[in-house]
Structures are given as structure tokens and as C-alpha cells.
Image: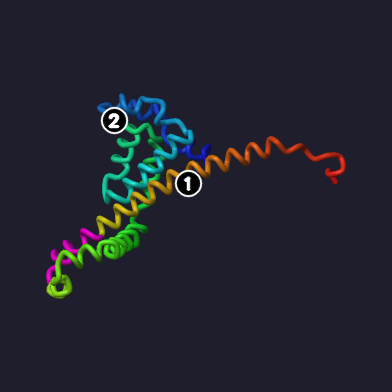
């Protein structure tokens, strides 16, 4: 997968010569944000997932800027934002709304004793949207934080497992004369 990813991504030099990227070219020139090592890839995944859940638009640009400043892999951060796309956007936002509603229900119930009455009187679309925005944003914050931490940990575990398998393969002796049947 790493070879395919490196083959399809643009070269660093090509991006640095782009006239639109000249204002931030000094940040993009740092070699650490282009290396595929465990720490940079884990940072890139975590930043990309966090930004992908939190921002509905402009995700790739913000993730790339954050990855450049945090020394995470820029390309991995940009690709990780694609967790939210036109196909996954509606179920993710609905699940975030439901999660936020469940987590905030004790707080919302204490805040206003007339919450059920207000919910029944919400006649306009603007009232409905404003009542749904707080649970949705809180749910997205929970999803972004949990997925960033899980992505960071998953990259580290997968990297260690891959190294463990490589070391096991190196340590195994070849087939002996009686095993070559």
C-alpha cells in the first residue's frame, strides 16, 4: 500500500513549484512532513480524522496546514479527512446528533424545565436547526476526539505488528531437506 500511495501522490518538488502554494512553501519544504515513519503517519492520521469530523468544508487544506505545523505526514492527513464524504456525511451527522443528544440530555433537561414544551412549539426550521446544532456539534467533537485517539493508536499498533511479522520472517530458517517434499 505504501508503494501505491507514493506512486499516486504528487512529488514534493512539484508542489513547491506551484504558484498558489508559494506563500506557504517554506512550511512545505520541511522534509519531515513528507516521510512515512510511524510517528509522522500517526500524527497525520490523528489530525486528518479530527479535522474530517469537525469541519464540513475546507477539511483537506486545514488538515494539511495543521500537519505541516505539527510535523505530521501531510499526505496522510489530507487523505484521512476523506472519512467524511458525500456518502458518509448524512449517517455520521445523524449519529453525532443522537450521540450528542444522549450525552447532553441530563444537562439540557436541567437547564430548562420546559424543554418538551419548547420542542413541541418549534415550528420554524430555524428553531429546529438551532435546537439540533448543540447536540450535533458536541457529538462531532466526541467523534473527532475518539477517532483521532483511536487512529493514532491503531497506526502505532499496526506499525508494531508489521515490524513484528517482519522480524519473525527473518528469524525463521528456510525449509530443511526433509521439509522440501
Residue 128 quadrant: bottom left
First in sequence, mark 2 or 1: give its number.
2
Left or right of 171, for residue 164: left
Q: Secondary structure at mark 1?
A: helix
Q: Residues within 10 Å of mark 2 (few under 14, many from 20)?
A: few
Q: Residue at x 38, y 40 (%)?
A: 77
Alpha carbon of mark 2 to alpha carbon of mark 1: how far? 32 Å
Q: Position of residue 13 (x, y in %)?
A: 39, 26
Q: Residue at x 16, y 70 (%)?
A: 115
The residue lying toward the viewer, choosing from 126 and 152, is 152
Q: Residue furthest right?
A: 178
Q: Secondary structure at mark 2?
A: helix
Q: Main secondary structure of the magenta part?
A: helix
The residue lying toward the viewer, choosing from 16 and 178, is 178
Q: Residues within 10 Å of mark 1 (few under 14, many from 20)?
A: some
Q: Position of residue 86 (x, y in %)?
A: 33, 56
Q: Say which residue label 1 marks.
A: 154
Residue 180 quadrant: top right
157 part of magenta stretch: no
127 part of magenta stretch: yes
Q: Position of residue 41 (x, y in %)?
A: 44, 38
The number of numbered badges drawn on the structure is 2
Of the numbered discs in the image, which one, if any, rests on residue 94? none
Left or right of 163, for residue 139: left
Q: Say which residue label 2 marks.
A: 21
The residue lying toward the viewer, choosing from 97 and 123, is 97
As drawn, 127 above or below 71:
below
Residue range of the region highlighted in magenta in the rendering: 123-135
Q: Residue at x 20, y 64 (%)?
A: 108
Amino acid at each position: 500500500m505504501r508503494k501505491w500511495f507514493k506512486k499516486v501522490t504528487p512529488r514534493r518538488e512539484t508542489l513547491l513549484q506551484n504558484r498558489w502554494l508559494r506563500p506557504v512553501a517554506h512550511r512545505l519544504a520541511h522534509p519531515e512532513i513528507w516521510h512515512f515513519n510511524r510517528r509522522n503517519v500517526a500524527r497525520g492520521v490523528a489530525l486528518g480524522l479530527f479535522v474530517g469530523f469537525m469541519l464540513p468544508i475546507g477539511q483537506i487544506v486545514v488538515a494539511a496546514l495543521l500537519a505541516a505545523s505539527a510535523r505530521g505526514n501531510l499526505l496522510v492527513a489530507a487523505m484521512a479527512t476523506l472519512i467524511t464524504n458525500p456518502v458518509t456525511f448524512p449517517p455520521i451527522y445523524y449519529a453525532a446528533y443522537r450521540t450528542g443528544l444522549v450525552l447532553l440530555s441530563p444537562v439540557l433537561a436541567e437547564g430548562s424545565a420546559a424543554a418538551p414544551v419548547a420542542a413541541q412549539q418549534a415550528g420554524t426550521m430555524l428553531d429546529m436547526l438551532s435546537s439540533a446544532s448543540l447536540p450535533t456539534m458536541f457529538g462531532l467533537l466526541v467523534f473527532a476526539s475518539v477517532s483521532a485517539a483511536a487512529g493514532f493508536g491503531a497506526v502505532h499498533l499496526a506499525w508494531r505488528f508489521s515490524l513484528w511479522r517482519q522480524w519473525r520472517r527473518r528469524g525463521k530458517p528456510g525449509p530443511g531437506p526433509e521439509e522440501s517434499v
